[in-house]
Amino acid sequence: MTAELARECVRYARMGWMRGTSGNLSVVLQRDPLRLAVTVSGVDKGEITAEDSVVIDSEGLAVDSDKIPSAEAGLHARIARVAGAGAVVHVHALAPVVAAEHWPDGVVLKDLEMLKGFGRQAHEEIVIPVVPNSQDMVELGDAFEKGFDPGVPALLVARHGVYVWGDDLMQARHRLECLEWLLRFKVETRDIFTGRHS
């Protein structure tokens, strides 16, 4: 499982979504008690290895290890607990951050075929929640939980990044890639729908 985390990190780093040491991934190892493997802090995601992960508990604290988990490990655990996710992916792709800047109350997506890849029907309307950024993972977790919709497996953190989750890393990856496309479309067509002209 830790090798899979490393492979996914390298993939996202090559896409430019995990620049430097930014971003983090996790996968649930067991439910009771909750345990997740999460990438460690401060490692270049393009050079990460299977050794660069640590097991955390439901509060995001390392279990029987002196390795330092990602600073956002607590939010990963909260999402896994509340949403029942098997894997959580957090990257710093640009389109989600720009979308959150334009639509701080939530990003509405509708009538787009790519919604199918996000687990919804093309004709549906969904709202991707946006929460203010914070260095306090309890505060972020509270904001996530307050706006949680079981049918929307994603969260935008303003001026920070995006979290997407799924049953496993592959489903989370597919959802993230589709969501990034949807948000890029939303941002790039913004002027069309607002009537603005350059």
Image (tube, rainbow, N blue to C red):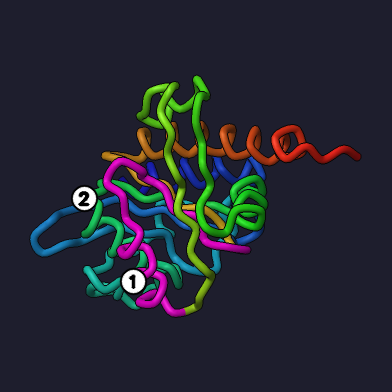
What kind of element bears circle 2?
A: loop
> What is the x, y in percent for residue 65?
29, 74
Residues in magenta?
136-159
In which quadrant will I find the C terminus? top right
Residue type, mark 1 in image:
Asp
Residue type, mark 2 in image:
Gly
Circle 1 residue: 142
Instruction: Look at the image and say whether residue 67 sits in the magenta stretch.
Output: no
Residue 114 shown left or right of residue 185 in the figure:
left
Residue 141 shown left or right of residue 161 in the figure:
left
Picture disc at residue 37: none
Question: Which residue is located at x 52 percent, y 58 percent?
Answer: 105
* Quadrant of residue 21 within the rendered picture: bottom right
Q: Compared with residue 36, is residue 152 higher up or lower down, i.e. above or below?
A: above
* Quadrant of residue 188 within the rendered picture: top right
What kind of element bears circle 1?
A: helix
How far apart in space, not on screen, are marks 1 and 2 (Cα)? 16 Å
Residue 22 shown left or right of residue 139 in the figure:
right
Picture disc at residue 84: 2
